[in-house]
Image (cartoon, rainbow, N blue to C red):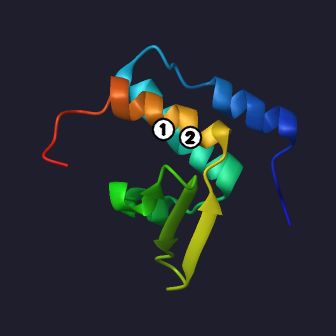
Amino acid sequence: MSYYSADEIAMILNSADTSTPDGKLEYCILCLLAYLGIRASDITALRFENINWSSGLLSFTQFKTGQALTLSLLDEVRYPLIDYIKNARPESPD
């Protein structure tokens, strides 16, 4: 089994330029990967309805396994997600 060390993860997270909209998106995705272990296919399928802000939970059905999954929306993920939504997400009907 292989994995990244804490230092390697910190280097990866720090590589995102959060001063740009694309960097905010990149950082948000990296946080979802690093802190919650969500697969890339599941990240691309996330919608607003998957986030329960008041209870601090992220719920979705995993693409690969078809299993329902509910995860705590850690501050390390919550704040980059809010930053992206408020400051970098393109206008959309959603």
Query: Front-most of 40 and 51?
Result: 51
Label drawn at residue 53 = none
| Percent coordinates x, y for residue 5 in the rendering | 86, 43
User: What is the three-letter code of the residue carrying label 1?
Assistant: Leu
Query: Front-most of 81 and 8?
Result: 81
| Percent coordinates x, y for residue 69 in the rendering | 58, 74
In the picture, residue 57 is in which quadrant? bottom right
Left or right of residue 48, residue 12 in this image = right
How many numbered discs sit on the rendered protein? 2
| Percent coordinates x, y for residue 50 in the rendering | 42, 62
At x 47%, y 70%, the residue is 60
In the rendered image, the vertical position of residue 18 relative to residue 31, given as above or below: above
Label drawn at residue 81 = 1
In the picture, residue 12 is in which quadrant? top right
Residue with the most extreme top position: 19
Q: Are marks 1 and 2 in contact (CB under 8 Å)?
A: yes
Q: CA distance from mark 1 to mark 2?
A: 5 Å
Label drawn at residue 78 = 2
Left or right of residue 66, residue 10 in this image = right
- Under circle 2, the secondary element is helix
At x 48%, y 38%, the residue is 81
User: Which part of the image, by quadrant, shows the N terminus?
Assistant: bottom right
| Percent coordinates x, y for residue 80 in the rendering | 53, 33
